[in-house]
Amino acid sequence: MDALPPASPPDPSGQPCHGGRETFDAAARAAGKTEVMDQLMKDYPRGPHDQPQSMCPAFGSLRVGLRMRRVATILSGSACCVYGLTFTSHFYGAKRTVGYVPFNSETLVTGKLFEDIRDAVHETAKPEDYDAVVVTNLCVPTASGVPLELLPKEINGVRIIGIDVPGFGVPTHAEAKDVLTGAMLRYARNEAEQGPVARPRNHSDEARNICLVGELFPADPVGIGQILAPMGLAAGAQAPCREWRDLYSALDSVAVAALHPFYTASVREFRAAGRNVVGSGPVGVEGTAAWIEAIGIAAGVPETQREAARQAVLPAIRAVLAANPINARITVSGYEGSELLVARLLIEAGAEVPYVGTACPRTEWSAADAEWLKAQGCHVQYRASLEQDLAAMKEAKPDLALGTTPLVQKAKEMGIPALYFTNMVSARPLFSIAGAGSMAGIVAAQTKGRERFSRMVSFFEGVGTPDGAGYGFREKPVDPPGFRDRQRKLRAAKAKAEEAVGT
Ligand code: SF4
């Protein structure tokens, strides 16, 4: 792909939803959060665009906590943010209570908010109900320096985890998952270093487990387990975990597979526990071969067993790819972190993928995928903005666009078949033999509909677009004579007047 346009802020006012990153960042530092902000900046380097450009990043950490057994979640933030976050959680089927400590200007300024949070934590931390309580500072409490680090570390055996997940410090909801996962791993590692800890369910002292990092489709750990078996390894705990004691199991692995490449804080904890961490994932023939080699070496597996693993799965993956060819030009965009792996799989299945954009940052765990994709002529855009994804789609004119909601909407307006990455692509296996055949059917079904899309676009031509939208039109709406011209002159006059007073 050629040069992409520079990204612009998501909001016409130039401010993301928290009202200005620099202002909030400066406020947080002045309020004593310098260390927190420095760590966030280091772990999650910024990209070309301001954020959030999609949903509130804190949704990522909220979801990780809500998916864990015996973990309570308390949010501290503006009511509107908490409304949006709880709404989204329940929309995605959380079925769990989200605690909230409200505040007003007075409780924020006097420090009473912190006392209210402390009271809420004491009230919630009942060992018969919970292993841990997670308290999350959203934008305003982070910027105001609400000191969650002063909360007790533990109440009656219930662990207390305080995290700051401000939209002006954590660029995507993907990386917010890492904020909580990393904080929990750190806590669990300290516990394990100090003495015996609870035995993880189904723990076997003999098993040589590989910890899988990333929220995976349920069939994927099974497929990965098949790849690992000939090497005497097994798919172990996943991080983010489903219950507290799984954290010990994750830390106890022989090596770690960073299948999703944005878990920087979590990897820090695995490395502190002495674990080797391997990037990329077993996608397609080449991806799986390279991954077997890397994970086998990381786990100290001899070459004969690595070769046995290759022989056990590569012919089957090759056969499935050959039986399910993809003959289409596809652009890939998303914020899940698996975009590069999906693009690799599509290319191995025969697709032409000229562009892959991910909202996640460049990290060492996706470096091999980026190199491989570049060698296939694919443009890889880290920290891609919506504007860059749209520009790439317009230029590439794909048969199918995989992307986020606004991209899919735009694609449909243009008559391009499109699929929502989160619901359609992430909701099917990606790795090993099952992954090899998972995309072909859906791509074929969508690209076949292209002609239908073109008919729809020509049928609705000019209707429902911004100034023709609304109820009650019987015919195609017609502009009042001279309307556009008058508006253009008014805009020009306004711009001139503003220039004259130097604003
Ligand atoms: S917490 Fe921050 S980023 Fe999230 S919705 Fe509120 S203002 Fe926006």
Image (spheres, rainbow, N blue to C red):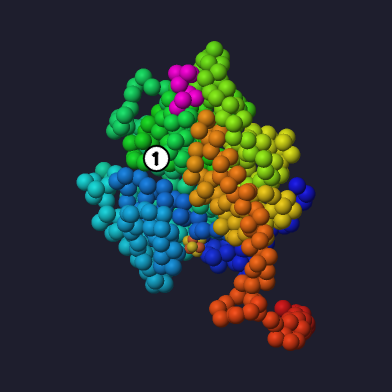
Question: In this orientation, does residue 78 appear?
Answer: no
Which residue does the image show at 60% across and 44% down from the upper left? 444
**Residue 25 image position (x, y, % from top left):** 55, 60
Dividing the image into 4 quarters, which one contains the C terminus? bottom right
Compared to residue 371, the image places residue 121 above or below, namely: below
Task: Where is residue 229? Give x, y as percent.
Answer: 45, 21
**Which residue bears the numbered disc 1?**
241
Q: Residue furthest left?
A: 128
Residue for point 57% across, 30% down = 320
Report if residue 111 is visible in the image. Answer: yes
Local crowd at mark 1 within 10 Å, few (<14), some, or many (≥20)?
many
- The region drawn magenta spans 225-232
Q: Nearer the viewer, residue 132 or 238?
A: 238
Residue farthest toward the top in the current orientation of the protein: 304
Compared to residue 430, the image places residue 288 above or below, namely above
Q: Name the one closer to the observer, 353 or 133.
A: 353
**328 sits left or right of 445 in the view:** right
343 displayed left or right of 39: right
Which element is circle 1 on?
loop
Question: How many labels, in total?
Answer: 1
Residue 488, above or below 419? below
Q: Is residue 339 magenta?
A: no
The residue lying at 60 percent from left, 80 percent from top is 474
* Residue plotted at (64% across, 39% down): 326
Task: Pinpoint residue 130: horizontal percent, then vertical percent.
Answer: 27, 47
User: Looking at numbered disc 1 in the image, what kind of residue is underneath it?
Assistant: Cys
- Residue 472 image point, x, y percent: 56, 81
Q: Main secondary structure of the magenta part?
A: helix
